[in-house]
Amino acid sequence: MDRSSLVWALAACAWLGFAGIAIICGGLRVKLLEPWLGEAKAHVLGTALVCVLLMAAIQLFVGASGLSGTWPLMRIGAFWTLLTICFEFAFGLLVLKKSFEELFADYNIFKGRIWLLVLVTTFWGPVLAGIIRGQ
């Protein structure tokens, strides 16, 4: 396996970890934060927690991968963002039996839904991690 293929395979594995982070945080949000804070505040806090944890994991990946430069890091971020959107809609539709309307509701920032920040973190996180690391 050449280096490029290895980096993409590791990026896919890293994304599985990201999905795990999001699922665990979602469960904690529903079980712990919502009863205490209410749904709207719990959504904001839970989303912020996911973004912080994703950024930490992205930092680890960028450091371990040795990738540098905006374009290679942006391609990894785009890959992760595409996987995230596909997973969210497939899981939401097939497992949770949600409608498209329910799924798109989390994208409505005008109603306090800030899920888009997770996608922004996933997309731009590698580039930001590269900048922070001086790569």
Image (spheres, rainbow, N blue to C red):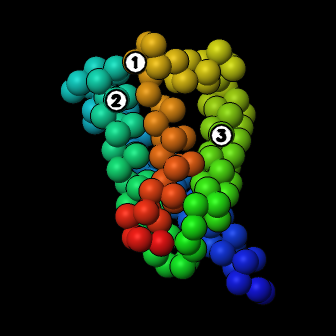
Q: Which residue is mark 1?
A: 112
Q: Is residue 39 left or right of residue 95?
A: left
- Quarter of the image with the N terminus is bottom right
Q: Residue at x 54, y 79 (%)?
A: 66
**Circle count:** 3
Residue indicated by mark 3: 85
**Residue for point 68% across, 19% down:** 99
Circle 2/circle 3 CB separation < 8 Å: no
71 up-or-down from 64: above or below: above
Check if mark 1's residue and mark 3's residue have beta carbons within 8 Å.
no
Crowding at dot 1, Cα within 10 Å, few <14 / some 14-19 / many 20+, comes out as some
The disc, 1 or 3, on the residue closer to the chain's N-terminal end is 3
Q: Callout 1: helix, strand or loop?
A: loop
Between 14 and 71, which is closer to the camera in this rendering?
A: 71
Per the image, the residue denoted by label 2 is 44
Label 2 or label 3, whichever comes before in sequence order: 2
Q: At label 1, which amino acid type do we have?
A: Gly
In three-dimensional space, the C-alpha distance between marks 2 and 3, rounded to whole angstroms, equals 19 Å
Secondary structure beneath dot 3 equals helix
